[in-house]
Image (spheres, rainbow, N blue to C red):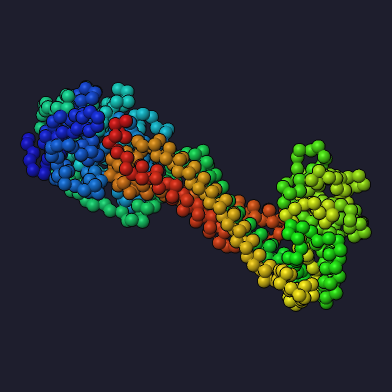
Amino acid sequence: MTHIGPMIVMKAAGLQRVFEGEVLTVALQEASFTVRAGEFVAIVGPSGSGKSTLLNVLGLLDRPTKGSYEVAGHTAELLTEHQRNDLRSKTIGFVFQNSYVLPHEPAGLNAALALRIQGVPMSQRTAMISKVMLQFGLSDRVHVQGRFLSGGERQRLAIARAMATDPRILLADEPTGNLDSANTSIVISDLRDMARRGVAVVVITHDEKVAAAADRRLSLIDGVLSDATVDDDVLADDALVHHLEAESDSTRSGSCLLRLFESLSDGLNSLSAKPFRTALLLMAFLLGAGGLVTATGLTQTTSAQVAERLDLAALDEIRFSDSRLPAGMLPTIADREATYDAVDALEGVERVGLTSLIAPADAPISRSSSSTTFFNGPIEVADANRLEILDARLTPITAVANLSAYPDMPAAVIGAKAAAVIGIERAAPGVVIWVRGSPVPVLAVIESSERDPAAEDKVFLNPTAASSIKNLQPTYVARTKPGYPAPLSDALPLVLSPDNPGSINVQTIADLRNLKTGVSSELGLMVGLISVVLLVLASLTAATAMYLSVQARSGEVALRRALGASKWSIARMFIFEGIAVGFAGGLAGSVLGIGAVIAISAVSGWSPVITPFMPVIGMGVGALTGAVSATYPALVAAHSDPAIALRS
């Protein structure tokens, strides 16, 4: 019997496909033919004759260079990219020599892949998959992961996946190429059954057994297609075909929310399928987000400690310097004593001492005169009064008295941690350090200090030991009764230099608060930069890993595109994958970062500052970094050519 009009589902006229490059390659010279609903057509020909190129054109995966092609009543050349995706999704089913079964997903989810791409609601999807799995003898394998299926089961699953959407056309590329004779017979039977149900089946094959089972054979040689036999008696009857057309034309549109959920689900499935790669990605984001949370917490904690220390000092401490002194030089003993007497006479002053920071390069300190290793820690000038102001606990406790009794003798007091670095176990007669090539006796070791927790890391030199050092900035420190720094800041310049009060530079409470703000800002900037570096490294690591994942999954991407997935849905899947692993890494990093802040604070004797926003920062930054790192790989996947990927 002869079919006309709507019974023709594929019509090609003068199709030609030329690939441009350094040399023009004519993959398809001329192809003109029609395929009716219910036909089983075999296209045979030697390797390199253009069969796969023709199949990609017929499946709307590629565009012909010349010629016209109509599929299911639509002119292919006039369709937009979105329309081609939609038509391919609802009208065409694909089966390839490689089954492209997703190995770590159950067979049921594999069969539902095209339905998931269409956004078919879950309630409809379950019934449709149960039906198609039963039809192809796979109902007992629904929950078995794809990697555990045999070769024949995988190919039957590929056919079930193609037929799950009730397509009007089934395109198969060497569907029996990897099968033994028994499974080949089963697949041929399945293809014949599809044709009887009204599906137009077009198979590319080298297998004579498959070609012999077809209703019509088309030969493709040197890019030219020629027709062979036709047996109209085996075409499906009109009633069945019209029923199939009506069923296929029905619109199944899933909600946007369901499509987003499917993309997220696909991303999570991909992550769970590669636990080692996922663990590496998680580690990268964990370090980045954890570093940021730790840095944020430590910034707030240390800022609070700095504020507390400076506020405490502002209550009972005042600092001042005298510009009349020679630049970079310490005052003499006589000048110091005169200043101490004048300041001690003021109401509210308890003690006055002298200090100055020393750059390690200006005062090389070593354990012996022949040592080439020098102490690189903090060094300060401190007389006996300054050590008392620090509330330092010394061993032996007589050191301050000795410093006061012999101010003209060089001496050093070393913090316990600094002593360990230099190699001094304890202070004792005969124990010296070498400063600028001269021996300086060590009078005591500082065990702790209430006013300066960092004193354990420092080396303190008395003014006599530091007298030969240049570039000093001598500063007087006055310990007062609480509340006196403010009035004393006005009185000191007039008392010490009535003729030139401006020569006395007093650091007031406001100055200390400015210092606190500056220290907090600089500390925040430093740890912020470190965090940015960690996040950039995490992003680069994740982007590289995801790019390699895209390359490894090119077959899966091509399959999804063949089943009608849009470029955006492909990109969305990888971006959601990046967001998911970034969010998880950020969550773990937040927990780790908060734990690190608590641990460091406990060791340092600080009160940790933890805010509710710290976990939000970690998870938010992790998710954002994950999305950014996945963007380029996602774009590469979305713009990959499915025809090329399937050919390779």
Placement of 273 over or under 427, stated as above or below: above
- Look at the image and tell me in which quarter the N terminus lies: top left
Q: Residue at x 76, y 38 (%)?
A: 372
Placement of 351 over or under 290, stated as above or below: below
User: Residue 224: where, in percent of width, then height?
Assistant: 14, 27
Q: Quadrant of residue 506?
A: bottom right
Looking at the rendered structure, the number of numbered marks drawn on it comes to 0
Q: Residue at x 21, y 48 (%)?
A: 80
Q: Is residue 242 visible?
A: no
Q: Is residue 24 left or right of residue 491?
A: left
Front residue (pair 637, 95): 637
Q: Residue at x 72, y 54 (%)?
A: 471
Q: Is residue 26 left or right of residue 513?
A: left
Front residue (pair 169, 129): 169
Q: Is residue 378 left or right of residue 212?
A: right
Q: Is residue 512 visible?
A: yes
Q: Quadrant of residue 434?
A: top right
Q: Quadrant of residue 99?
A: top left
User: Residue 403: where, in percent of width, then height?
Assistant: 89, 57
Placement of 582 over or under 301, stated as above or below: above
Placement of 184 over or under 515, stated as above or below: above
Front residue (pair 254, 577): 577
Front residue (pair 533, 131): 533
User: Residue 588: where, in percent of width, then height?
Assistant: 56, 50
- Look at the image and tell me in which quarter the C terminus lies: top left
Q: Residue at x 32, y 43 (%)?
A: 639
User: Residue 210: where, in percent of width, then height?
Assistant: 22, 26
